[in-house]
Image (cartoon, rainbow, N blue to C red):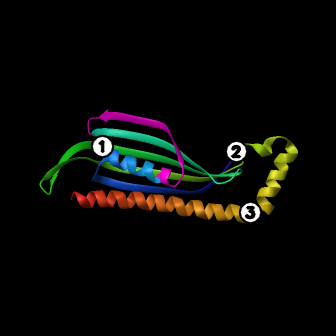
Amino acid sequence: MVEFDKVTSLMVRQKAGLFDFKEFYAFMYRWLTSEEYTVDEKEYTEKIKPHGKEIFIEWRARRRISDYFRFYLQVTISVLGMTDVEVAKGGGKFKLNRGEVRVDINVFLEKDYESRWETSPTAKFMRGVYDRYVIRGRILQYEIKLRDEAVNFSEQIKAYLALEARKFA
């Protein structure tokens, strides 16, 4: 059976800022794929409310590290009160979106994702010994690397949103 070790949780939030939603979506997707993650979109919900659109997106991004380990990011994107706006800047008009953005990133180290150690009770016991004593150092190294990648991803999202807000302020 696959085992998930939760490494960290991160959140990025922007209140009522200007951004291009399509470009923001593409930016995050491109970042994950450039880091060799496979991204599956598990949910995309869009609701029209009186105060604007509400969008909820859930991604599951995985990257194979070895036959035993995979990096796993669960990314949830929520946009509240999104409205379309037209901004005049530098002699041109730009169609943008205004709304509150929140991105939650739950980070896991996935172990034995092919369930190779689940063939018998003895193999399952040996896996526990293997994890705790033989490769404990490698697990810690992967957790640090995964945490650093997730922090970098969240910082890139923050920087993108801040840049978009300043660009059209």
- Residue identified by numbered label 2: 2
Residue type marked 2:
Val
Residue for point 35% across, 34% down: 47
- Reply yes or no: does residue 34 show up in magenta: yes
Q: Is residue 57 above or below residue 63?
A: above
Disc assigned to residue 81: 1
- Residue 111 as seen in the image, left or right of residue 119: left
Q: How many marks?
A: 3
Q: Residue at x 47, y 36 (%)?
A: 43
Q: Position of residue 14 (x, y in %)?
A: 34, 55
Query: Does 96 appear above or below 148?
Result: above
Q: Which residue in the protein does label 3 denote?
A: 136
Q: Residue at x 82, y 47 (%)?
A: 124
Which is the main secondary structure of the residues drawn in magenta? strand
Q: Is residue 69 left or right of residue 121?
A: left
Q: Earlier in the sequence, mark 1 or mark 3?
A: 1
For label 1, count other residues whose C-alpha is less than 10 Å away and answer few (under 14), some (14-19) or many (20+).
some
Other residues around mark 2 within 10 Å, as few (<14) / some (14–19) / many (≥20) = few
Which of the two residues, 143 or 68, is positioned nearer the viewer here? 68
Q: What separation in Å lies between label 1 and label 3 (alpha carbons)?
A: 46 Å
Check disc 2 and report its element: helix, strand or loop. loop
Specify the amino acid type for callout 1.
Gly
